[in-house]
Amino acid sequence: MESFISVLNTIFSTFGAAVIVPVILFIIAKAMGVETKKAINSAMLCAVGLTGFSLVINSYSAIVAPVVSQMVDNAGVNLPVLDTGWQSVSVIAYSTRVGVLFIGVAIVLQLVLFFVKYTDVFMASDLWNNYSFMVWGSLIYAITGNMWLAMACMVMQLLYILLFSEAIAKRWQNHFQYPNCCMTAPHHLEAAPYAVLMNWLLGLIGFNKIKLNAETIQKKIGLLGEPMFIGLFVGLLIGIIGNFNQLGNLSAWGTITSCGVSTAAIMAVFPKVGGIFASAFTSLTDAYRSKAAASGEGREWYLSVNDAAGYGEPNTLVTGTLLMPIMLGLAFVLPGNLMLPMADLTALPYMSEVFVAVSHGNIAKSIVMGAIWFSLGMVMCSQLAPTFTQIAVEAGFELPQAGVYVMSFGIMCHPFMLTIFYAFLSQNPLVIGIVVIVYIVCYILFKKNRKAIVDFIENYGVETATA
């Protein structure tokens, strides 16, 4: 069994999402009666879209990352927990038997829950992001040696994520304009309940009146408000902050303008790549509607896609980019925080997707939501850093320098996932039981009130957000 799962993991690691996801899409399309020519075309459009996302984001990250690094250096504060990015997490995730074993368990569970209609989210199409569960289970296994406890923790996290994804699937689909698609990346989606609550609370105190999004900015200032120019201004701002100590040097201005133009470019190019990716699902959506009409079945379901699909949406990119200096500044003043966000700062557009979608693109709301949630995550992760670092070193990760700890800001500074982890790590039946009972209650309440909940998420604040 383990050898089969290992082979499966090797296949996925070798071919990657740009090959595996289109293959899955082709199989689903054929199962739904789509003719072979259209199914192949959909699969190819999906592959091209995913590859386009990767090329655009990687190129942009290569330009922005040095600016972010310089911004960190300029801050001049040495916090002992360094954000070394998702790489340190993957070392842990794949270093234990329970981590690798969970890949097979997750795929089977995600398929079964979908086909028995326990969930309307087909999560198995985003296999890669399962490693975000694996790291927590691997940590529990490394600390306690209890494989069943580790497996139970990951399964519980998976069930919560499926529930959250189903609740905001329509909102994510409509905001990012990918028909019948949703996002299930655990390290982003875990903030969904908080985002819904905060969207409502911020609306009560007047944030709905702050019409700060790409559409309203464009209406007010015309050409300069187009996404491309917004990207230029935001990129220049980040470039100036990152090179603040070298503004008298011509080379610094070269970096600043490069950052500005690159941000403008991703704002202009990303929607076109997104359009290619979205068109991959047209045949599937049409086939589903025809099949549902013929059979009388009214099931609405969503295909999980990689979080890269939402990275370059204008409000998301602006929110994430502005949060970079904000989170860096907060790291120095937060009581109890020992983490210096570094490598994963450039992942903040990914991390902001849920906030942006739930708030209907309200940048002001999204920034406040993200700043509070990620700050809490940093404080919580500061306490876990020594343990994580020890296990990472034992798994073969090399520390960047002596006397420091490592952590991933993007993958692990997420309060809800941390809470479930600590509940299972406690090995206290009462605490674990509470986590399970809360899930059961939430699941039942959602299923009984699905339409009301989805409609509230879909409609609250939409009039003022887009006025």
Image (cartoon, rainbow, N blue to C red):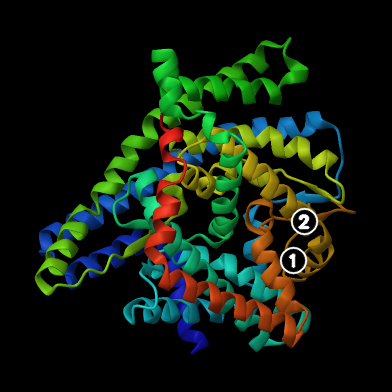
| x 51%, y 59%: residue | 185
Dot 2: within a 10 Å radius of its alpha carbon, few (fewer than 14), some, or many (20 or more) residues?
many
355 is higher (above) or lower (below) than 290: above
* Rendered location of residue 436, percent (x, y): 61, 80
> Which residue is identified by label 1?
392
Work out whether mark 1 precedes mark 2 in sequence or the reverse, and give the earlier one.
Answer: 1
Quadrant location, the C terminus: top left
User: Which residue lies under the disc numbered 2?
Assistant: 406
In the image, 3 versus 207, the foreground residue is 207
Q: Is residue 12 left or right of residue 398?
A: left
Residue 145: in sight, yes or no? no
Quarter occupied by residue 431: bottom right
Residue in the picture at 17% in, 70% down: 32
Residue 323 numbered mark, or none: none
Within 10 angstroms of label 1, few (less than 14), some, or many (20 or more) residues?
A: many
Look at the numbered discs 1 and 2 and tell me whether their residues touch, using CB distance below 8 Å: yes
| For residue 446, above or below residue 51 | below
Q: Amino acid at mark 2?
A: Val
Location of residue 417 in the rendering, given as x and y in whole percent from the top left corner: 65, 65
Above-or-below relation of 2 to 263: below
Q: Nearer the viewer, residue 351 or 47?
A: 351
Q: Is 68 on the left or on the right of 301, as rendered? A: right
* x, y percent for residue 103: 50, 76
Residue type marked 1:
Ala
Q: Position of residue 81 (x, y in %)?
A: 81, 52
Q: Give the Cα separation between the discs numbered 1 and 2.
A: 8 Å
Q: Secondary structure at mark 1?
A: helix
What's the residue at 81%, 31% (across, down)?
75
Q: Which of the two residues, 103 or 420, is positioned nearer the viewer here?
A: 420
Q: Assign a secondary structure to mark 2.
A: strand
Name the one closer to the observer, 273 or 454. 454
Location of residue 117 by image quarter: bottom left
